[in-house]
Amino acid sequence: EQGRYQYSTAESNGENSFTAQVGTYYGGGFRMSIPSTPSNITQEQALLRVKQLRDTRWIDRQTRAVFVDFTLYNPSDDTLAIVKLSAEFPTSGGVLTRAYLRQLRAQQLWLRAEGTAHVVLETFLLLFILGYAGSEVRLMYRMGLTAYFGRFWGVYDWINFLLFFVSYGFRYHALALAGGLPFPPTEGTFVNYEPPAFYVVQWKNLMAINAFVTWIKIFKYLESVPFLSHLLKVFYTALPDTVGFLAATIAIFVGFTLSHFLAYGDDIYAYRTLAASFVTLYRQLLGDFDVQSMEDSNRVLGPAFFVLWTLVSTILLLNIFIAIVIDSYEKVRQQVDRVTFAAFVRESALPP
């Protein structure tokens, strides 16, 4: 059956690279379309096509993964569900299966009345951000680069701007990709909406991060409020020691991650990789631990590592961090008089 199936590139497939459970796949492969119209004849044709793939050994010893892609659309709420079913064949044998789903509103890709209104408002927001960035450029010109970026908020503002600009790039790129794809597709054809949907998801991810970053900027303006400036000064005073504390904590964390991975990596699924071991140890900090499986894997190191990790993380490191905050609070209290909210209202807000 050599030559029956032709390899197609990622570009011709319209696919991005995809990372599954075992490896990363770059979109190219041997593609086969299965009829999908809702009729008995089509179902028989689809079943016949699958049997042909089986009989002609479409899946052979060289196959490392098979993906089944299809798209569902709910017109009542204008929702697209882009589904990918994966079956991976690791070199050790067996099959690893998993389902992946991207869900989004169709109007985020193809503009209609509500979607157009959203894009217009988003464009106004982008123009406002550009104006804000322009004012920061003028301030940078007056202060000089060294003085401007020597301030914490100077660096923070441009991180905020960069996240906005990159996220809007993802947003408009998704619209451009979707503009070249038909919606709804013609009957019996498959249109891959995964690439534009991928950029919509990344846009949402970046905006989710930037929402937090933007909200934190409120402290930039609260510095002028007396009863809140005390709290901010405590934070700024504790920051240098906290950075050193975090560096020491990460070093300890990595050391315990390596030890747990080497001790349990072959037996316990939660410690199968260094990344998984790191996450499992962090979950133990929050009280989610399975001592029995550690003891079953290694009756000596299991209890020993558990006791040592809990002593170091929850008793030693936590108390050091509390001591840093308390010490910073005392330093600020000795330097400035604290203004309470009641005193601020009495002296500033109320008339004499």
Image: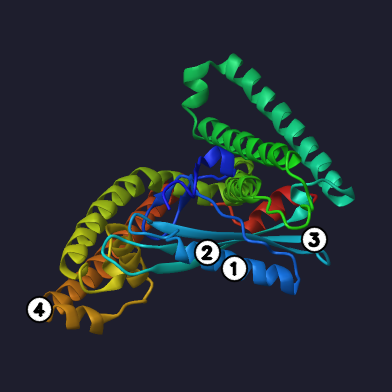
Q: Nearer the viewer, mark 2 or mark 4?
A: 2
Of the numbered discs in the image, which one, if any, rests on residue 48? 1
Q: Amino acid at mark 3?
A: Asp
- Near mark 2 (Cα within 10 A), the count class, few <14, some 14-19 or many ≥20, is few
Where residue 214 sits: x, y (%)?
Answer: 62, 44
Q: Amino acid at mark 4?
A: Val
Of the numbered discs in the image, which one, if any, rests on residue 78? 3
Question: Which residue is at the front of the view, 351 or 338?
Answer: 338
Closer to the chain start, of discs 3 and 1, is 1
For marks 2 and 1, give the CA distance.
6 Å
- Name the quadrant containing residue 268: bottom left
Q: Nearer the viewer, mark 3 or mark 1?
A: 1
Question: Which residue is at the front of the view, 193 or 7?
Answer: 7
For marks 4 and 1, give the CA distance.
58 Å
Is residue 259 rendered to the left or right of residue 341?
Answer: left
- The reply to whether dot 2 and dot 1 touch (C-beta < 8 Å) is yes
Q: Nearer the viewer, mark 4 or mark 1?
A: 1
